[in-house]
Amino acid sequence: MNDTVYAAELERDVQFELRPHRIFRPFLRQGPKGNSLVFSFVTQDDEGSAGTDITEGTTDMASNLTTISTTNANATAAQTAFAALVTDLLKEVSILDVSPHVSGVLARSMGEQYDVDAQAVLDNATNDTGGATTNTLARFLTARSALEQRDVGSQGERLVCGLHPKQVGDLQADAASLAAAFLAGDNALVNGILVSALDGYVGDPFGVPTFQSTTISSASSAYQGWIMAANSAVGAYEIWVDKIGLQRDESKISDEVIVSGAYGFALIDQNRIQGFLSTT
């Protein structure tokens, strides 16, 4: 009677794959979709504070005009896609609702690709704090201070931080090892960084909302984290994101599932982002 028994029971409620936390999109300046592949983000240049001393009845301001200039940063949208075949035979015999399941897997791949592409643009920032050494709270404050010294926040910007989980772990270890007064009493959370909910959001150390993702890249033995002005430093131009399509391929007795995106990114203002580097 062994041939009347399944070799194994299969779980129908499939546990999803582990993926990096998606932390980028809410903090990108969005360029409205239009009739071009390119969107230009425009920033007013700082024309300084060197005014003209006036002698009453003599000074002609027409010969002392201030030139008002702007700087453009272009985001160029490009297409990328993921595809898979779902055969008729598989749909008939699988315990899963195959097409929606495959669509979900591809959509999550597309989302991860979006974040990888966004991080690649952030990697082009030229102002950095730290290097291939262990992360510390002091380094966090140094990076934040660098932005403050460039007047970030004077136009109402708010800061946000993106780190690799290794960088976050080093921050937590540093905080746990300190005997500073702010760790005493009921303030054991240290603004949240000593408590982990295994979530993308870590906490707001020193008033800076901080997020973690393994999408944060590395170079020269250092993770390339960042602190930036949200919705100001980096822009995104999205013609579409996570579009799911289905087409019949009768020659393969299959459906082809395609998930695609058409988007691009631009580093708008180097002054509004600070690289936050620490060892891998």
Image (tube, grey):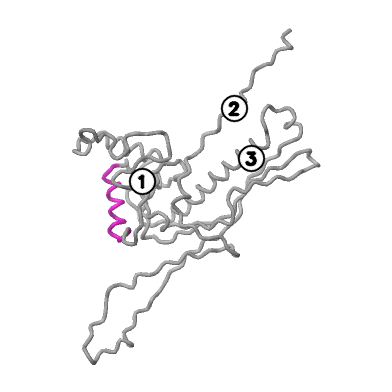
Give the left or right position of residue 10, taking residue 91 as reference. Answer: left
Q: Vertical placement of 115 versus 94: above or below?
A: below
Residue 241 coordinates in the image, percent (x, y): 58, 51
Q: Badge 1, how many Cα within 10 Å: few under 14, some, many 20+?
A: some
Residue to which mark 1 is pinned: 209
Label 1 secondary element? loop
What range is drawn magenta here?
A: 136-152
Identify the image quadrant of the C terminus.
top left
Q: What residue is at 31 percent from the left and 84 percent from the top?
A: 64
Please tell me which of labels 3 and 1 falls first in the chain.
3
Q: Residue at x 36, y 39 (%)?
A: 168
x and y, in percent, of residue 96 in the image: 66, 29
Q: Quadrant of residue 71 in the image?
A: bottom left
Q: Check disc 3 and report its element: helix, strand or loop.
A: helix
Q: Give me the residue at 51% from left, 50% from top.
A: 117
Residue that numbered label 3 is attached to = 103
Residue occupied by mark 2: 13
Q: CA distance from mark 2 to mark 1?
A: 34 Å
Residue lying farthest bottom? 57
In the image, 232 versus 278, the foreground residue is 232
Residue placed most toward the observer, 262 or 173: 262
Mark with earlier residue (2, 1): 2
Q: What residue type is disc 1 on?
A: Pro
Tell me, yes or no, whether the highlighted magenta stretch contains residue 143: yes
Estimate how packed mark 3 is, as few (under 14), some (14 to 19) or many (20 or more) residues with alpha carbons within 10 Å.
Answer: many
Is residue 66 shown left or right of residue 8? left
Q: Looking at this view, name the residue that lies furthest to the top.
A: 1
Tell me the quarter of the image containing the N terminus. top right
Q: Majority secondary structure of the magenta segment?
A: helix
Q: Residue at x 71, y 37 (%)?
A: 86
